[in-house]
Amino acid sequence: MKCTRRRPPYRPLTNGFVLLAMPLLLLLLLLLPDAHGLRCDRSPEGSGANKSPADGRFRLRISGNPEKYVPGESYTISLVGIRSMQVPHKFSGFFLAAEKDFSLVRGDAPPSGVHNVGTFQLAGDALTKFSERCPNAVTQTNSLPKSEIQVNWVAPPAGSGCIAIRATVVEHRDVWYMDDGPLSKIFCEDEADSVDTQPPVLKECCACDEAKYELTFEGLWSRHTHPKDFPSNGWLTRFSDVIGASHTVDYRFWEYGQVASEGLKQVAEHGSTRMLESELKNQSDKIRTIIKARGISYPNVTGKTFAVFRVDSNHHLVSLVSMLDPSPDWIVGVSGLELCLTNCSWIENKILNLYPWDAGTDSGPTYISPDQPTNPPEVIRRIKSNYPNDPRSPFYDASGTEMKPLARIYLSRQRLYEKNCDADNEEENETKQACETDPWSDWTDCSSRCGKGKQTRRRTFRHPMKAKQAECKKKLFDRRPCVGTDRDCDYNSQEIEEAYQSDPECEVTEWGPWSECSSPCGKGNKTRSRKYKKKGARKKCERLPNPPMLQQTVSCDEDCGGDISQPVLSSDINPKCKMTQWSEWSPCSVTCGLGRKMRTRMPINKNMKVHHKRFVSYYMTRRRMTAPDEEDDSEEEDGGEDNDLHITDQNDPCYGVETVEEVTCGHDLPPCDGLYGVPELCFLEPKPGNCRDSQTRWYFDSDKNDCSILFFTGCGGNNNNFMSREDCLDTCSKDRKFTNIPIRDQISTSAAAGFEYGGEMKQDCKTSHWKRGPCNATCGEGFRVKSRTILVHPSNGGQRCPRKLRKVERCFVHCDSSRHDTNPSWGPSTRYEPEPIECEYSAWSAWSPCSKTCGDYAVQQRTRYVLNPENARFCPHRLEERKCDIMPCLLGK
């Protein structure tokens, strides 16, 4: 009998198996949002309209504007509506997603599977939530109009490739945009860089062009990031002023394992940069740019500060430092950061975390340790969680966990400066190596103790035999003119001038025109300046003994007008008053038109910081005014204490001494209208307009001196708007060929039609300089009237004239102890109100009827009113009266 095996009957999956599989499936779905990178449908629900092309009114922005992402780093992503006419465009809905970008992957279809694209984190407001439609996506919580939303995005781990951040924006129900232009951002992993490591230093930089960088220093140190023993008096926390330099490969002003210089010690212990800056200037042959940025302090310790600098093929490293305060001698910074690339170009962007360093000059273990000088000084060392191995250190961690950075720097390349460089061949490189020399020796003393002489210096070849074989032509002996200035010498400045004019490196231009007198009424100073003919010669020539004078200041005495003369003042200053020397004149506050420059001196006493703070406030206020005549119409008529240029504390031994001098500058600068022959419209900020059309136009970028694309909406905007790049360049380029200025597409507006360069340009109002009258006090503090007149009235839409043409301001007359004032204006007397001057009246009215019909006491009156009541506080003579010539009254009347 044949035996066959019976097949077991088919049975479906039991309910128990399904229940067991469901949790595993749910767990898989929960894990997908962190890693899922497949595309999903991001079109808005309920909209029957097709997608509109993006017109630039809504944009994605990523903090720091990075070209690449650092794995694991957090970025702030914003979706914003661009402002038009000072009002931002608003949207009702949005969809923000991170997806794997396959645009660089070869093949017809992208690789399958799940891809890590990083994770979104909500900012904690009521505008955003995670999407229920797509994993790892963010959408709106309501349909209310909004102009900006923000989320955080944490970049995926290393090896994740390129990521696309894409946005859908719903403006109205049937108007929406997706992915186009500024609504997408693709950036790839920065594989060769790290925020915690520096690139290797190149012995030689082969880049031909020079580069300009912007440095952003950002503080990260706070009670939240570094909670251990954080200073309880948080208002004292700060980063000192940042100081650094771009320099050669053989120079460092601070470095790991080296002993700190005296200048670095001053920065590390006190936050003072003056001595270190002097040390840097003494090494000017190894430095291209000295970098300086204002420090950041409470409550903005986590804020940012900025600076710019330049590098070239010889000076391709950058170093900088800032003190962590309070601390014994701790600093943050970078030493010898390489910006040159091996492909002979320059790094575009660099982000670097900064950690604390011990300068080795003080042994204090905590933020607020008392001074404990380290003798002898130790070398500079990095502070870590396990060094110093002292539990009192605020950075100590027994587990050895990596500490968080205290600050971060961002370097962004702003511009390249092209140079004509000949490619170096092998023979030239060999010759260059054979002809290397040792540094120059110091200059010898001047050969003449008095008058003209010579100084010399020498250097030698490092490889004399190779240099002889290569027939090197480098100069080994150098001389320069000098002037002996022994105290017993009788010399004049003309000799010094002639000596240095013979050096072509230090030739200077002719003197510019004299400025106006710093005091429009009475004694003051005026100044003039000149500069070196050769750009960059200042570094070298100012190190010479008795360098050419670039500024001259002489006294002047302006007539105050009128029949009131200023009192003859004593020039003696209280012998107890100790003042610093006058500072150098500040740079001119403008690059076109007329501006200001100032110099200051301070009393050397306990109130020196107070006076310095007042001067900085005064200087910043005045610097915002581009021309001497642009006074703020809103300022009080009687002035304010913060604007006083004298010391007004009567208990101060320097009471009444002038601390600030100010003169007009810019007489040798081009006018601001049509700067360098370029129409003013070329300097306007581009505006896309306020309509819904989408047109590609061009605008002139004055920073780049080139034309860029503008997404124009069809209406609005301004005149920096051109149909083509050629039109833009023809109008705004310094080398343009045509004089007609094409504006938009010849739209018929009164502002645009017929506008022609060289035709009727707009005329701004122009006024005279302020003229100050005499002080009404003969000793001490008083008041005076200053006035100005309109020289040219505005036309063709020019800037309007100022409202106030007369003002009352404080003045001060130094008291002469040899005179006795019979009517002093100092002391406990009440404030003196100045007598108004030059009231402006209307015409007289007609005479009134006589007050009587007969008799000797009948009078007539006429009146007039004041035209400038806001400027003249008291105006008499508004009523005139005369007797009537009438018959006497009859007896009995």
Image (tube, rainbow, N blue to C red):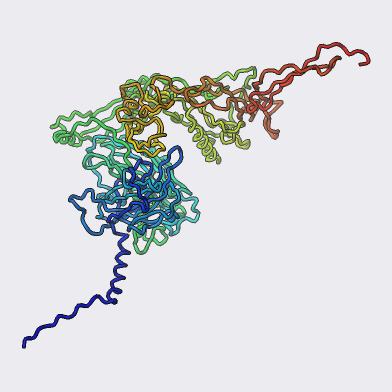
Residue 542 place in picture, x, y as percent = 37, 29
User: Farthest residue in the right direction?
Assistant: 892
The answer to whether one can see residue 799 in this image is: yes
The answer to whether one can see residue 877 in this image is: no
Q: In the image shown, does 193 or 17 lie closer to the viewer? A: 17
Left or right: 128 in relation to 780: left
Q: In the image shown, does 394 or 851 lie closer to the viewer? A: 851
Q: Answer with the quarter of the image where residue 502 lies.
A: top left
On screen, 596 above or below 117?
above
Q: In the image shown, does 170 or 565 lie closer to the viewer? A: 170
The N terminus: image quadrant: bottom left
On screen, 327 above or below 488?
below
User: Farthest residue in the left direction?
Assistant: 1
Residue at image location 27% in from the left, 49% down from the top: 188
Residue 38 place in picture, x, y as percent = 27, 56
- Marks counted in the figure total 0
Q: Answer with the quarter of the image where residue 495 lies.
A: top left
On screen, 744 above or below 403?
above
User: Farthest residue in the bottom direction?
Assistant: 1
The C terminus: image quadrant: top right
